[in-house]
Image (cartoon, helix red, strand yellow):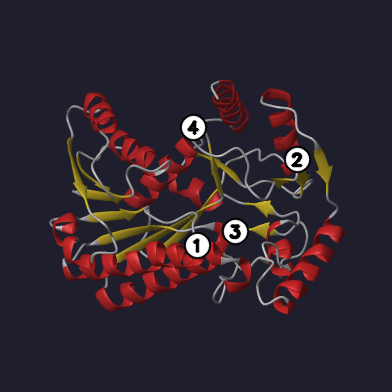
């Protein structure tokens, strides 16, 4: 079976490739936006000499050059997406790129397509404090009130389902929480933000839905190879820390921060003011946090990975070890500046 991974050079994508090969895939095509990183290709070929590993470069916004990428592919894992940039860039690279890819893959009769989605597509605002967040939670209608990234990922997943109906391919969706690990960022905005010389602690006692990057990649590989057509899986690890616990670990292991805790009620009140002023000023002050974002992301919930475990996934790197590896990496990065 030939498997294609888009976004293979990314923080998650390169780990997905290794997890697939470790799971027994012996014919793998890696997609990169530009030239393939020689070091990555050499590493994978040395670790898995029995496998056929090839690379292809393509810009997903240029539909005309995608035919060769999907040719003779049996299973495609679409991990390429825009995580940052302007709203227009995020929408184009996530939604338009996915549309071009699905049109081409559908015409080429790719049998199975796996989409790497996001927790941001879930409509968690109505959930009660302490509720279980699993795959039964409803999805957002459009995600607009949660910002450009949530809107782009929501529309991407909706479009994915539309193409599945049109072309009849087998679909599997994975929705990771906060992916972390060496090579990634220090903080999710769920923990807080740095501004004006302070770190504003926002998530505080809420659980942080972490998934260590290697654990996440293993989950994607297992779901891609074993998941039932039409299935969806949340990807989070066990023994999740609170946002405050993650922040304390950072301060103890990486760097001291001047922390200002923001109570939930004050955060929600500030978000209401910000949204009101954003409208009144006609966008001069960006509405970075809206009441919908605050109620969706910063209340205590319980996160389930039971569906993944039923598929056979086991957490390879314990959360405590993953956090320590991440802190060690971040400390080394700071020291080298």
- Residue 273, x across and y down, in percent: 80, 69
The residue where tag 2 is placed is: 197
- Residue 46, x across and y down, in percent: 23, 24
Q: Give the residue displayed 35% in from the left and 37% down from the top.
A: 19
- Residues at discs 2 and 4 in contact (Cβ within 8 Å): no
Dot 4 or dot 3, earlier in sequence: 3
Q: Residue 278 or 51: which is nearer the viewer?
A: 278
The residue where tag 3 is placed is: 134
Is disc 4 placed on a helix, strand or loop? loop
Task: Kindly report the distance in space between the C-alpha atoms of the residues bearing marks 2 and 1.
Answer: 25 Å
Asked if residue 330 lies left or right of residue 103, the reply is: right
Q: Give the residue displayed 71% in from the left and 72% down from the top.
A: 278
Crowding around mark 4 (Cα neighbors within 10 Å: few <14, some 14 to 19, many 20+) is some
Is disc 3 placed on a helix, strand or loop? loop
Dot 4 or dot 1, earlier in sequence: 1
Task: Kindly report the distance in space between the C-alpha atoms of the residues bearing marks 2 and 3.
Answer: 37 Å
- Residue 68, x across and y down, in percent: 13, 57
Q: Nearer the viewer, mark 2 or mark 4?
A: 2
Q: Residue 241 or 269: which is nearer the viewer?
A: 269
Task: Kindly report the distance in space between the C-alpha atoms of the residues bearing marks 4 and 1.
Answer: 36 Å
Dot 2 or dot 1, earlier in sequence: 1
- Residue 113, x across and y down, in percent: 30, 60
The residue where tag 4 is placed is: 316
Q: Which mark is residue 86?
A: 1
């Amino acid at each position: 079976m030939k498997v294609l991974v888009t976004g293979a050079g990314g923080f998650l994508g390169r780990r997905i490739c290794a997890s697939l090969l470790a799971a027994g895939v012996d014919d793998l095509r890696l997609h990169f936006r530009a030239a393939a990183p020689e070091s990555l290709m050499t590493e994978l070929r040395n670790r898995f000499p029995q496998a056929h590993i090839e690379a292809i470069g393509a810009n997903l916004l240029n539909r005309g050059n995608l035919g060769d990428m999907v040719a003779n592919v049996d299973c495609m894992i679409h991990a390429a997406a825009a995580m940052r940039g302007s709203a227009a860039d995020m929408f184009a690279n996530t939604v338009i790129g996915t549309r071009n890819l699905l049109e081409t893959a559908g015409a080429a009769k790719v049998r199975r397509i796996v989409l790497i989605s996001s927790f941001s597509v879930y409509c968690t605002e109505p959930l009660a404090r302490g509720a279980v967040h699993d795959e039964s939670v409803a999805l957002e209608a459009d995600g607009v009130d949660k910002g450009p990234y949530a809107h782009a990922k929501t529309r991407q997943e909706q479009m994915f389902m539309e193409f599945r109906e049109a072309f009849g391919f087998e679909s599997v969706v994975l929705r990771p929480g906060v992916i972390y690990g060496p090579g990634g960022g220090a903080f999710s905005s769920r923990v807080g933000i740095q501004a004006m010389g302070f770190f504003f602690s926002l998530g505080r006692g809420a659980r942080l839905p972490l998934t260590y990057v290697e654990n996440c990649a293993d989950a994607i590989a297992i779901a891609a190879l074993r998941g039932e057509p039409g299935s969806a899986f949340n990807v989070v690890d066990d023994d999740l820390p609170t946002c405050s616990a993650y922040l304390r670990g950072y301060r103890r292991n990486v760097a001291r921060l001047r922390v200002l805790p923001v109570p939930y009620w004050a955060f929600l009140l500030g978000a209401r003011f910000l949204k009101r002023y954003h409208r009144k000023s006609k966008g001069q002050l960006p509405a970075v946090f809206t009441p919908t974002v605050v109620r969706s992301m910063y209340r205590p919930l319980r996160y389930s990975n039971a569906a993944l475990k039923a598929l056979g996934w086991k957490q390879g790197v314990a959360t405590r070890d993953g956090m320590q590896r991440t802190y060690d990496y971040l400390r080394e990065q700071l020291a080298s500046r």
